[in-house]
Amino acid sequence: PVPSKSKTAMHGEVAFDVLMLCNDVTEFRRLERMRSEFVANVSHELKTPIAAIRGFAETLLDDEAPAEVQKQFLQTIYDESNRMNALVSDLLELSRLEAEEHRIQLLTVPLMDVVERALDRLTQVALARQIQLELEPFEPVNVWAEDDLLLQVFLNLMSNAIHYTPSGGKVTIRCEILVDRVKVHVIDTGIGIAPEHLDRLFERFYRVNRDRSRASGGTGLGLSIVKHIVTALGGEVGVESEVGKGSDFWFTLSRMSRLPEDKSLSMGGE
Ligand code: ADP
């Protein structure tokens, strides 16, 4: 007769298999739900500008509106099509990242080069909104990254900081050089974010204030792209914020390991 002990062990194995199967089904259902929520969100986000474009175009076709009103309507059509364009670009960027994240080739990138490219791109935007852009000096350091993806992270965080800060405010880039990582902060003196939103900010299409996001040309995808890229580069993202005071969005990157030729980079600042 089979000893009862091994019978129990056999039952245990079957139970384990059943449990694994249940987990797979649950995971499958979760992914399926996420996918259909995503499609619903995208459809909704596209419907808003399409409805506006259709509505204004119809009015222009029907009415004998005065020239200045026509111009105003055309401007709205132009703005809404730009919004759709931004949304489609961000969606393509997300799907490209998902398809390629396992194939991203990390190279050593001088952090300062990327920061300077980002500052070049956004200086005029900040100036136009009367926001002071400041870079705190830091030692030259090489990080493991892909430079265009890293630039995208800076651009998304810095343009958010500029857009969610009233004019007269300030946006600061701070690079903290740690032993094996660099922690980059994009700090603003803007509107800030209430604690209950902080956990969900990096989700696709999550916004604290939809109208404000739309008014600034936001797609609701900027931070989820940031999180995707930083994770693919092996780092972490986070945020600290206080309503009315401002926000500190940060991310980490791995520094080059301390190979002998990298000695100059690993001295000091740690
Ligand atoms: P959006 O295109 O709406 O800016 P993001 O994914 O970039 O989308 O950001 C998500 C939301 O996080 C924004 O709608 C805004 O509510 C909030 N947010 C992002 N950055 C900041 C910031 N620097 N200050 C205040 N709120 C911010």
Image: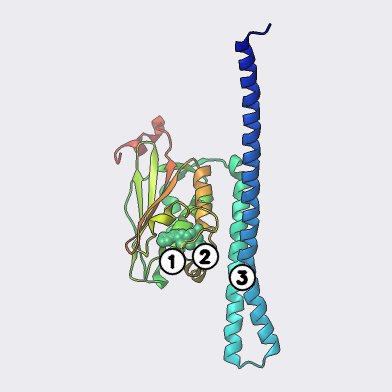
Relative horizontal placement of residue 172, taking residue 70 as reference (left or right): left
Pointer 1: what residue?
163
User: Residue 218 shows which numbered tag?
Assistant: 2
Question: Any atom of ligand 1 within 8 Å of the CB at mark 1?
Answer: yes
- Label 1: how many Cα within 10 Å (few below 14, some 14–19, many 20+): many
Residue 68 falls in image quadrant: bottom right
Of residues 38 and 2, the one nearer the viewer is 2
Horizontal and vertical percent position of residue 155: 47, 58
User: Residue 48 shows which numbered tag?
Assistant: 3
Q: Say if 202 sits above or below 65 in the image.
A: above
Relative horizontal placement of residue 57, taking residue 195 as reference (left or right): right
Answer whether labels 2 and 1 touch (C-beta < 8 Å).
Answer: yes
| Marks 3 and 2, the one that precedes in the sequence | 3
* Element type at mark 1: helix
User: Residue 230 shows which numbered tag?
Assistant: none
Q: Say if 113 sits above or below 66 in the image.
A: above
Relative horizontal placement of residue 187, taking residue 159 as reference (left or right): left
Of residues 133 and 237, the one nearer the viewer is 237
Horizontal and vertical percent position of residue 52: 62, 76
Q: Alpha carbon of mark 3 to alpha carbon of mark 1: how far?
A: 21 Å
Residue at x 50%, y 52% (from the top left corner):
226
| Marks 2 and 1, the one that precedes in the sequence | 1
Q: Say if 213 sits above or below 231 in the image.
A: below
* Element type at mark 2: loop
Residue at x 42%, y 39% (from the top left corner):
255
Answer whether labels 3 and 2 touch (C-beta < 8 Å).
Answer: no
Of residues 249 and 117, the one nearer the viewer is 249
Q: Alpha carbon of mark 2 to alpha carbon of mark 1: how far?
A: 9 Å
| Quadrant where the image shows the C terminus | top left
Question: Any atom of ligand 1 within 8 Å of the CB at mark 2?
Answer: yes
- Label 2: how many Cα within 10 Å (few below 14, some 14–19, many 20+): many
